[in-house]
Amino acid sequence: MKKLAQVQKIRIIKINAKRMRKRLRRPSAAYNAGHTAEAKAQFQGLRAKLPETRIEHERHPGTFSFLPPKVFSFSENYEETFAFILDFRRYFSQRGKQLCDDGIRRRAYAEFAEIEKIGPGAGLVLAAETHRFAQTRGKPARIEDHLWAENVRDYFLEAGLFELLSLDPGTIATRPSQDAQRSTLKFTFGRTSHGRDAKALIANLQALAGHSVGPRPAVYAAIAEALANVSHAYPTWFRTWPYRTSRQWWASGFWSPSSNTVGVQLYDQGAGIPATLPKQTHWPRILRSLDPEGSPSGLIAAAMEYGRTSTGQAGRGKGLAEMANWIESTGSGFLRIMSGGGEVTYRPGGLISRRNFNAPFCGTLVQWEVSVGS
Amino acid sequence: MLHSAVPLSNGRSALEAESYEIRIVDFSETPFGRYVDDGPESGQVFRDNVLIPALNQHAHLTLILDGVEGLPSSFWEEVMGGLVRQGWGVGDLKERMEIVTTEAELETYVRLGWRYAEEAASKRQH
């Protein structure tokens, strides 16, 4: 066999290394197509588990309106709220007019004017959906916010929905009223997370409240751990439909002077904690011992409990427990983690309540609500 | 890897005798994440690029916590527990490294740091 010269050897090694890097970086088109089809089937299966969204034709000329529930909140009205979120994603991911039941093609119209009450978590998730929509379109969305309920319009104006949508402020039909009940923090988002994101979120929250929102290290560690968890949220096998996997996070917050309460919400559109935890090497055995039934909320609660009682290198369990330390350090409020098919609410003293969903949530929503001194 | 003083042929230690100070805040005011994949402010980066080279060079270290926003457990466990997992002994570390802070809110991290190291040592033994 012919002996290769040193230069040729190096060249071959470099080519092979390049091929390997490429293979690791970008899965084949067939691989992607298979996973996308799977993601589409999952989306459709998920949507079928939820109630139908009410649809009205020609409420606005040339459109079909799909109506959100009047109470747009995951804690008070999970199924209808989530159904609207999925329909928003489905209808607005398609370009042009869509075929309606009566055989006529119309444009989709999300009837935000129907919403009378909006929860901060559901508001953030809806804002993230509208942001994804804006990211996929070249032209700005048309918004008729003068038709919206005043509290809903105020919430979205304060939170900066229009900036997320890259809308010219001149096109906004109304201005926010000065509501003394609640001030909302502007939405922030990112693809990568850093400690400075957590610091900025806390600084903005303190500026809104006008004072400290808890012991500095505990608050920083809680939010930093939640942000660090976003990097686990999008494993390489994870695909979404109709949009491609975003690898993004969104955050917001509020200050309620009447109850001296601050709130922070952090959302990602990833695979969810129950789906990603058991894939880590030592988790299946540990979690099964803590939660034999293996329900989604049980897995989250068990991971949190494991983190609270162990200090070792435990992956996300310790991080989840640290997210609860802010609640413990102030002795008030709650931490709610809604992820995949489960939700866990943590209150001071280690009180944990759980619920499982028939239709698993798309991603992870972490919410803190803490009473702080005036 | 150099884990402790390496005697030279003349019997003198290769380590510099004077105490050396490391302020975590000089590395990052906002420590974040466990592994290098989590970013440049992670525990792994701090341990491998700052702490271990200093331990290899100096006989005594003072690790100052002042000024950081906080020390998330993923960062701090990877620093202290990670040292032990890399082969450093807890006794040796306690002899050569002091963790200090003047901020009351950060005092808990001194105790927690050593606890992470001891936990990692006990796991290594099992």
Image: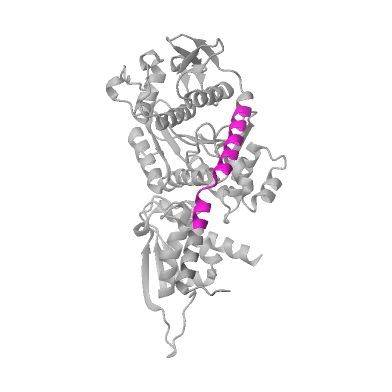
User: Along the horizontal axis of the image, is A209 left or right of B44?
Assistant: left
Residue A116 makes an appearance in the image: no
Q: Looking at the image, which residue is at 42% across and 86% down?
A: B12
Image quarter of residue A294 = top right
* Closest to the observer, B54 or A215: B54
Q: Position of residue B86 (x, y in %)?
A: 53, 67
Question: Along the line of sight, which residue is nearer the eye, B93 or A169?
Answer: A169
Q: Position of residue A248 (x, y in %)?
A: 45, 39
Magenta residues span A19-46
Q: What is the residue that sits farthest to the front in this orientation?
A: A2
Vertical placement of A285 versus A163: above or below?
A: below
User: Residue A371 in magenta?
Assistant: no
Depicted A197 relative to depicted A183: above or below: below
Q: Give me the residue at 41% from left, 30% from top.
A: A254
Q: In the image, A203: left or right of A322?
A: left
Tell me if residue B61 can be seen.
Answer: yes
Could you tell me which residue is drawn at 67 percent across and 46 percent down?
A287
Q: Name, please, the residue furthest toward the left.
A: A170
